[in-house]
Amino acid sequence: MKGTRNIAIIAIAAIVLIFVAWGCSAQRSLVKQDENVGKAWANVNTEYQNRYNLVDNLVATVREAANFEQETLTNVVKARASATAINLTADDLTPENIAKMQAAQSQLSGALSRLLVVSESYPQLQANKNFLQFQSQLETIENGVRTSVRSYNDAVASYNVKVRSFPMNLLAGMLGFEKKATFTAEPGAEKAPSVRDAFNKK
């Protein structure tokens, strides 16, 4: 009788140890995936910061052109200010926050496209080496943004599958690991961005 009781105690202890070991392993796995999302988000922010910095240089160069459309420049500056006002950390990645950031970035993209279209009417800009250099850099940065957003979405998708899958979802809920939002595709997102195309629009 006593032997049976000891066996039961040992069996229960073994089960508890198995669950504790699984829980520790699962927690480490969740942390790793969460860190991957954070790293991917940091890369997105880096690309956007590169874009903001370039906008400053581009606007400064364009301002040197005589009689350039002030409204166009003002719209670019305002759009940049709106975009930089949204500062999200890896803990703020809700669908609502991502949507706000996407909207602000889309507004900035539109303002930049309009700037490049209007600049076509200013021959002195077309001869400005700095302007042409910034124009080329902008296209490179836009492609970098696309790549970093795609990597971020991949990291979030992998994380969300783990957080939502049984039995991991039970542990994730207890430890505060919540589903994160992805960027959604915008119209025309299947095409690589081209500053040259925007520049040649009428």
Image: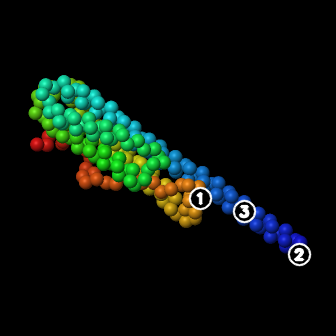
| Figure quadrant of the N terminus | bottom right
Helix, strand, or loop for circle 3?
helix
- Mark seen at residue 174: 1
Residue under the point 31% across and 45% down: 104
- Sequence-wise, the earlier of marks 2 and 1 is 2
| Whole-number angstrom distance, CA of label 3 to CA of label 2 | 23 Å
Label 1 packing within 10 angstroms: few (<14), some (14-19), many (20+) = few
* Amino acid type, residue under disc 1 in the picture: Met
- The quadrant holding residue 116 is top left
The percent position of residue 26, horizontal first and vertical second, equals 60, 56
Q: Is residue 162 above or below residue 72?
A: below
- Mark seen at residue 16: 3
Q: Is residue 35 above or below residue 25?
A: above
- Sequence-wise, the earlier of marks 3 and 2 is 2
Residue under the point 31% across and 44% down: 105
Q: Which residue is mark 2?
A: 1
Front disc: 2 or 1:
1
* Amino acid type, residue under disc 3 in the picture: Val
| Whole-number angstrom distance, CA of label 2 to CA of label 1 | 38 Å
